[in-house]
Amino acid sequence: MAKNTIYFFILLFCISCSSVKKLPSSESVAISRLKLLDVYDIPYNYQYNNTTVGGLSSIDYNAKTREYYMVCDDRSNINPARFYTAKINLNNDLIDTIIFTAQTFLRNEKNELYPNNKQDPKNVPDPEGMRYNSHKKELIWSSEGERIINSKDTIISNPSINVIDKKGNLKSSFVLPQNLVMQSVEKGPRQNGVLEGMTFGENNKYLFVNVEEALYEDGPRAETEPNKAFVRFFKFDVASQKNIAQYAYELDPVAHKPTPSNAYKVNGIPDILYLSNNKMLVIERSFSTGRLPCTIKIYLADLTNATDISENVSLIKKTNFIPANKKLLLNMDSLGIFTDNIEGVTFGPRLKNNHQTLLFIADNNFNSFQRSQVFLFEIIP
């Protein structure tokens, strides 16, 4: 089903618009199952506005303008840190075209482009999540920060949650709780396992973010056998930009054993999407060396009865908490198709039958053997 050509004819966009309807509020979406409609591949090393398109780590939909925002996790190594704006046009319930319409560089508090590792390794961003605030007509993005501890150097850079305008200019940053501060000792976030998923809730009153893997003090990383690998969801008040609650979520084991057995493996949460009444979609992405596809599981999570663990310094030492309830909605292994490194999810427009769509995007890590896939699903109520 994958297509590998991106067209730039506005006429095609106008035609395809007639097949979709405006996105309603995601606060009332009910989901019983997901039906795959199409998969679209963005060509490897596709060039737009003198930048290389790849590393697409998030996707969000602006229903009013019918455009999508995709943050790129290029750490200013290929081109300056940036996000893309694009049109994803549907026709007969398939992805007809993806048209990139803008590329926007991110800027720091000095209104400068972010540096790369050679220029200033302690201030390099690692963009992972991005959402559009339709109330304020602004964007918010997260950086994972950095934690490199070795005999040659020590680089400590805190994660961040940043509010920007549509031109990429920094407006403000959220206040992070102490357990999200990077440290040189084994406490706080792990390297490359920090702020990944991000979603607004309750009509943009709250922002939920999650760490991809367990904090050091909360327990081990996921293994191939169940080992109580808990990650944290952080609930922020958007008005004050402060953390007001934290919740535990237990990860599944890594789906497949790596080859060789001591090689790299991981299971974590790359993105979340709020539904309503403390419920959200959660993506669990598992990868094991020796197996190119990722195992992608989509869960329905419910925070209603989960314990606020803000005061729990360690989930190992204090175990009398209730984690979020989770129910498997879809294991993409069952689709019988190749699934790459899916890192983002968003609601899209409605189909002709008035069913809601859901779109996922895969980060190809700028590797020729990976794919920048866009998945289109129909939500069956």
Image (tube, rainbow, N blue to C red):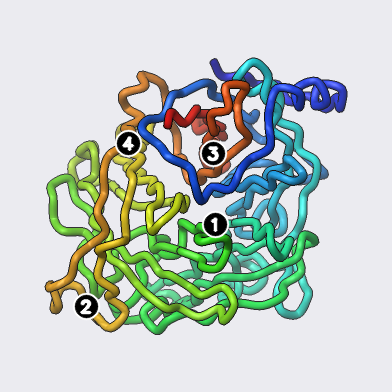
- Marks 4 and 3, the one that precedes in the sequence: 4
Residue under numbered circle 4: 329
Looking at numbered disc 3 in the image, what kind of residue is underneath it?
A: Ile
Looking at numbered disc 4 in the image, what kind of residue is underneath it?
A: Leu
Residue under numbered circle 3: 361
The quadrant in which the N terminus is found is top right
Residue 116: percent from the left, percent from the top?
64, 65
Cα distance, mark 2 to mark 3?
33 Å
Cα distance, mark 4 to mark 1?
22 Å
Q: Which label is found at residue 254?
A: none
Residue 216: percent from the left, percent from the top?
27, 72
Looking at numbered disc 2 in the image, what kind of residue is underneath it?
A: Ser
- 188 with respect to 207 (left or right): left
Residue 154 lies in what quarter of the image? Answer: bottom left
Quick one: label 2, few (<14), some, or many (20+) residues within 10 Å? some
Residue under numbered circle 2: 314
Asked if residue 223 is positioned above or below residue 347 in the image, the reply reads below
Label 4 vs label 1, nearer the camera: 4
Cα distance, mark 2 to mark 1?
26 Å
